[in-house]
Amino acid sequence: MLNIYSWKLPFFWDTILTSTITQYFYHHGFQNFIIPAQLDAGHPPLFYIYFTTLYHLFGDNLMTAHWGMLPFSILGIGAFIRLMHIFSFDRKQQYVGILLFFAIPAVATQYTLISYDAALLSLYLAALVAYFDQKKVLFSILLIILLGVSMRGLFCLIALSSTIFFIEKNKIISWLKWNLYMLPSVVFIIIWYAYHYQQTGWLFATNAEGWAQQRSFVDIKGLLKNGFSIARCFIDYGIIILSLISIFYWINSKKINQFTILWLVPLILFTIGFLPFSNPINHRYFLIIYTLMLFPVVQFLSIRKTIFSFCTIGILLIGHFLIYPVPISNGWDCTLLHTSYSINRNKMIKSIDKNKIDRTQIGTVFPMNTSLYQTDMTKDTTRMINIHGKDIQLSKYVLYSNVCNDFSDEQLLALKKWNPLLVKHFGMTNFILFENPTFYSK
């Protein structure tokens, strides 16, 4: 149902990069599989190759892109259900688990997008199933795909190895054997990054504008900021209920059992991996932990009255509507409220064109500075000016939306003195086109 619902949804937030890269491959060919520097975030190309191939087979349009996510959606929920079977959850517990799975705002939303984070979640769950079912060849294949989807697949591989280590306990030989089945994926990713380095001169950190600042190490202030961001990821959008129940289950168990190992190990490793870097930490990075928390949550709820299950599901669903006011940033790609953004944006663009305002002269920030070619896969390649970190007084017009996190406090303060020309509001997203009252006096 989520996939059907998503068929007409444009690319949004960081998935716009996927659209841009896949359309580049579609129109220019795969060539040497290396994309232009301004698009290259260092991710392996498998995800992009997959969708570009689908475009060639079924047409380059939004429906094809969303159909491409369907196998990942089926794999994800199928693997989750299989894990509940493996853990001997009864039918009622499985129903509660499935409802909770789709009630998590970040999970539901990412599955409506063309998201490699959703793909990572599905592949990670499937790899766990392969491990518990002792399907070693399938385990190896899944890990190759997992590492080929995103750079964060490396964190997933380390988390899987560590999880198996703690589950196997004292069976070191058994754990080492499972690590041998991880070797093909390690060899694959080493070959890819060696090739990438030979072609570009860098491995994980590029000096290209827009990426360099996201690949550097942070100072103490940055570490504290990242720590706060990670903590917030386990509070926002109703996730706090999963966090509290999982911690309570851990404490009440008086030991770290299998259910706790499944989510705690990747949480610790992901946190260690994300903390030192300047790359903004997003809620979607923790989809795997959110989902693995459901096993102790379902176990906890199963010995309580049904009303507790309904309340937990309700809190998660309400999480879609927990949007912070400006200037606090929001994880819009982790709530289905973002769907009103594209409706509003298209209405605003039509109004701008109707008023014969040149869009190339309008300042804005991500994601509005991208073209309809990138988001809606139309032929409209017109882009607005990205004014992130720039002086907006040099702009005649600025298009503002509460969906954008990149407007600085200074820019927001300055816009209060500008003239609002056009206003669009739908759902919980709004757009305002401002005109600079001092532009003509310069």
Image: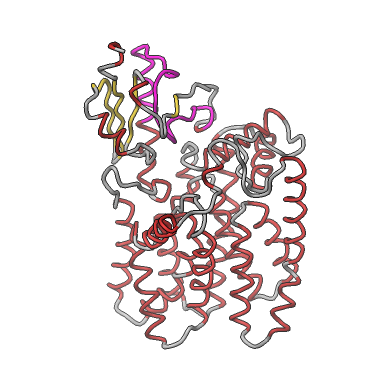
Residue found at x 65% / y 31%? 24
Where in the figure is residue 426, as x and y percent of width and height?
29, 35
Residue found at x 34% / y 38%? 408
Q: Is residue 211 above or below residue 108?
A: above
Where in the figure is residue 158, as x and y percent of width and height?
62, 67
Which quadrant holds the C terminus?
top left
Inspect the magenta stretch and tell me whether residue 323 lies in it. no
| Highlighted magenta segment, given as a residue range | 345-374
Counting the numbered discs, the total is 0
Q: Is residue 364 above or below residue 220?
A: above
Res 120 → quadrant: bottom right
Q: How is the image coloured?
A: secondary structure
- In the foreground, 30 or 93: 30
Left or right of 362? Residue 27 is: right
Res 200 → quadrant: top right
Where in the figure is residue 367, as x and y percent of width and height?
44, 35
- In the foreground, 38 or 215: 215
Where in the figure is residue 403, as x and y percent of width and height?
35, 39
Residue found at x 50% / y 31%? 376
Res 253 → quadrant: bottom left
Q: Is residue 79 above or below residue 48?
A: below
- In the foreground, 74 or 12: 12
Inspect the magenta stretch and tell me whether residue 347 lies in it. yes
Q: Is residue 306 above or below residue 391?
A: below
